[in-house]
Amino acid sequence: MSARTPSESAREIPEATVARLPIYLRALSSLTEAGTTTCSSEDLAAAAGVNSAKLRKDLSYLGSYGTRGVGYDVEYLRYQIAREIGVTQDWPVVIVGIGNLGHALANYSGVRSRGFQVVALLDADPARHGEVVAGVAVRPFDDLEQIVREQRVAIGVVATPAVAAQAVADRMVAAGIGSILNFAPTVLAVPAGVDVRKVDLSIELQILAYHEQRKAHGETEGASA
């Protein structure tokens, strides 16, 4: 049986599984760094924070990389998942909005160690132009089209205030960027074929607050029983 190419298999993988593949990759990278060469599905599931049945189901979409009674070859599985995701190459990334969040993202080592290269930092504020962040000079936002064309950028990060985010996304899409990671607290409208992932820290905190409230309510009920 011939192996599927990443593009062929990616069409068959459920979105929920795709969302977990980077988690498995991170767990496998940690196991590699710890000197672990083989692991069971139970060990990998524990390292990834999922149940082993779900992990085995997810990996079944990629093919059979485990050996009964032995488990998974950590380095081989790590490579196969990285290949499936597409991070065996460096993807050029541009970050727009170099305020506090933009600085933090530019300095985040996890970007460079996970198959991405920040090729440009852009901001509309002339006072920031020329500032060097993580070895990259901040350039005017008007340089976006030139950078996308020269660096073949496919992924853009929006780290601007909400009021500017849609206009930035529109320029990104017009310049040819096909995937956007949005940190602005707003919903972006993009054409079909453009992928947007939203990261909203306030929503995540509110979800945690909900769970804390539920726990506190349960403790109160238990104490009054």
Image: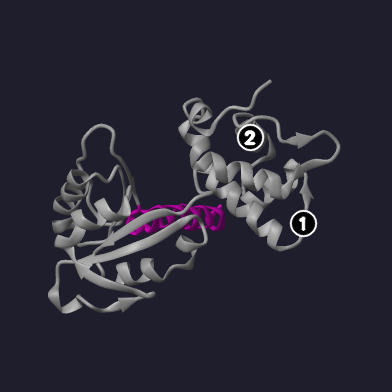
Closest to the observer, 48 or 142: 142
Horizontal relation, residue 164 to residue 90: left or right: left
Dominant secondary structure (helix, strand or loop) of the stretch shown in magenta = helix
Q: How is the image coloured?
A: one colour
**Type of amino acid under label 1:** Thr
Count the marks. 2
Give the residue at mark 1.
36
Q: In the rendered view, tell whether residue 136 sits above or below residue 176.
A: below
Image coordinates of residue 27 in percent, x first then y, are: 63, 53
**Within-10-Å neighbours for mark 2: few <14, some 14–19, many 20+:** some
The residue positioned 18% from the left and 57% from the top of the image is 162
Magenta residue span: 199-225
**Type of amino acid under label 2:** Leu
The residue positioned 23% from the left and 65% from the top of the image is 122
**Within-10-Å neighbours for mark 1: few <14, some 14–19, many 20+:** some
Q: Is residue 201 magenta?
A: yes
Q: Are marks 1 and 2 in contact (CB under 8 Å)?
A: no
